[in-house]
Amino acid sequence: MKIIIFAGGVGTRMWPLSRKSFPKQFIKMFNGKSTLELAVKRVKKFGYENVFISTLQQYVPLTKKYLPEIPQKNIIGEPALRNLAPAVGYNLVRLRSQGYKGPVAILWADHLIKNEDEFIKTIKEAEKICAKNPDKIIFIGKKPRFANNNLGWIHTGEKISTNLFKYKEWSYKPPMEKCEKMFKSKEWLWNTGYFIMDIDLGCSFYEKFQPKMYKQLTKIEKSIGKTNENEVVKKIYPQLEKTSFDEAIAKNILPTEALVMETTMEWSDPGTLYALKEALIEKLDENLAKGNVVTKETKDSVIINEEKSKLLVTLGLKGVIVINTKDASLVVPKEKVKEISEVLSDFENDKKLKKYL
């Protein structure tokens, strides 16, 4: 099986810790390791020759520096930020052009998993199911701990075996009211974002659901390994529609085209500053505090200070994010943390503010 780890995001929802020049997947925040390093270490048993890293072209040097164990030819540079539908499609046709047949695992560089043995067991089991059912994509879901509107959800159907279900539907970051109903129903799982599918099935999804994009991807595919490859990729890839895999492909998949595997691995997606706390701190009222900080009468908050020479003190806060770095600080209630990306989009057109991105 081939494994593709996607590490091309710029991490705007983790600003100001994450910047365009050094995004979240490279930050050594977890016992001296980055989430990208941890993601690669987890799949070591599959053989690094079978592991591919897809990232923005500008991050290829950083990726090579952080991951010397990965063959350089397996580090794929995306010439433009076009979201995940183009990125996944590009990597699928690259593998197909090299003659690969069989299952492909799609994984992400910014997740945390505590029990790695269970992760390996889950991926290997999904690989076997995929090999027996090449006409179905295998979604991997996790029993929800609470109603979380920062994640995608998968609606499970009839139980096939202990941890395998038929697939009903997919819901991406639904409103909290809907999340609470889904949580109470016990029919929905958190979507880990991991899935395994036969490479031919994956390509057929693009041909069926995104015919225009597929046509452009096949033009790239024909150039791979030829002298004009870089020229063709740089010309066509930036023209691909900027859209998520969920929107372009996943939401269109029929119940007959998928299966759902429930995993017991301890998984979390620290995609926002508050989600980082949810991933690292078990009790809701406790704080995630890092650096030179003092917290008084402060609960359920994230307090991070990257300046060793400066003391950061909080008093009487509840559910607030306070981040201090050497050149930028952020204070935001946890309910508003998802809106950071919108604020930063305004920075793009402001010469004075753009340098802080």
Image: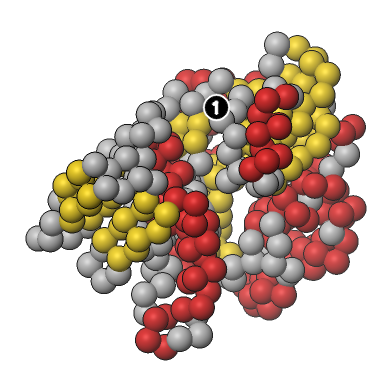
Q: In this picture, is 223 found above or below 42? A: below
Residue lying at the far bottom of the rendered structure: 351
For image coordinates 75% across by 54% down, the residue present is 247
Residue 138 visible in this rendered orientation of the protein:
no
For image coordinates 68% across by 78% down, the residue present is 235
Q: Position of residue 28 (x, y in %)?
A: 31, 48
Residue lying at the far left of the rendered structure: 309
Q: Quadrant of the N terminus?
A: top right
For image coordinates 36% across by 75% down, the residue present is 356
Q: In this picture, is 162 found above or below 348? A: above
Residue toward you, 253 or 351: 351
Q: Position of residue 337 (x, y in %)?
A: 47, 56
Residue 352 visible in this rendered orientation of the protein:
yes
Q: Quick one: SS at disc 1?
A: loop
Q: Quadrant of the C terminus?
A: bottom left
**Three-letter amino acid code at the position of disc 1:** Arg
Q: Is residue 7 left or right of residue 235?
A: left
Total numbered labels: 1
Q: Position of residue 4 (x, y in %)?
A: 59, 45
* Residue named by callout 1: 145
Residue toward you, 118 or 105: 118
